């Protein structure tokens, strides 16, 4: 399943390309997100067997992903980048895009974009 997703991504453009490690990680994150969403939908529908299968697939995918950054370290980066934005004269919701980009650059593969956005939004509001 993972190999298939990577293969599809490598031929998705005008011509086949060899994916970089970062691009493969992005494909894996996308597949992991799909499994989480599918498991939630199956749980809501009362189909626990299918939800369990999705969660098992998620566990396999996560074993290939880089370790996630803990919440405390990520919050520290968010706070530092918000301070840097304030020093640059950008505050409040206007700073959100700038801060999210800076945090993503610093966190790298250690944090999911949705998780970063949620922390930044909570800190700015």
Image: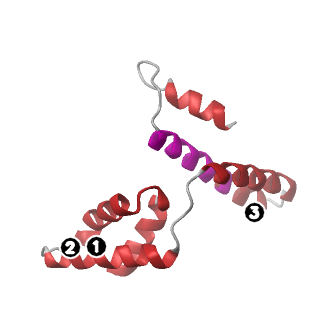
What residue is pinned by disc 2? 85
Res 44 label: 3
Asked whether the beta carbons under mark 1 and mark 2 sit within 8 Å of each other, the answer is yes
Q: What residue span does the magenta drawing correspond to?
A: 21-36
3 vs 2, front mark? 2
Q: Is residue 9 above or below residue 45?
A: above
3 vs 1, front mark? 1
Return the residue nearer the eye: 57 or 121.
57
Q: CA distance from mark 3 to mark 2?
A: 41 Å
Measuring from the top left, give residue 68's x and y in whole percent.
54, 63
Q: Is residue 34 left or right of residue 88?
A: right
Q: CA distance from mark 1 to mark 2?
A: 6 Å
Q: Is residue 7 above or below residue 58?
A: above
Asked if the magenta segment contains residue 104, the reply would be: no
**At numbered mark 2, what does the secondary structure look like: helix, strand or loop?**
helix
What residue is pinned by disc 1? 81
> Label 3 crowding class (10 Å Cα cut-off): few <14, some 14-19, many 20+?
few
Asked whether the viewer can see residue 43, the reply is: yes
- Give whichever of discs 3 and 2 has the lower sequence position: 3
Q: Is residue 111 above or below residue 92?
A: above
């Amino acid at each position: 399943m993972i190999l298939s997703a990577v293969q599809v991504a490598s031929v998705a453009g005008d011509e086949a390309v060899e994916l970089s490690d970062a691009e493969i990680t992005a494909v894996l994150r996308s597949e992991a997100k799909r499994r989480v969403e599918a498991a939630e939908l199956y749980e809501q529908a009362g189909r626990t067997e299918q939800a369990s299968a999705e969660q098992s697939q998620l566990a396999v995918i996560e074993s290939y992903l880089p370790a996630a950054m803990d919440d405390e370290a990520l919050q520290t980066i968010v706070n530092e980048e918000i301070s840097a934005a304030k020093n640059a004269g950008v505050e409040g919701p206007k700073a959100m895009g700038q801060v999210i980009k800076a945090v993503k650059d610093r966190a790298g593969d250690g944090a999911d974009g949705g998780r970063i956005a949620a922390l930044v939004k909570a800190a700015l509001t």
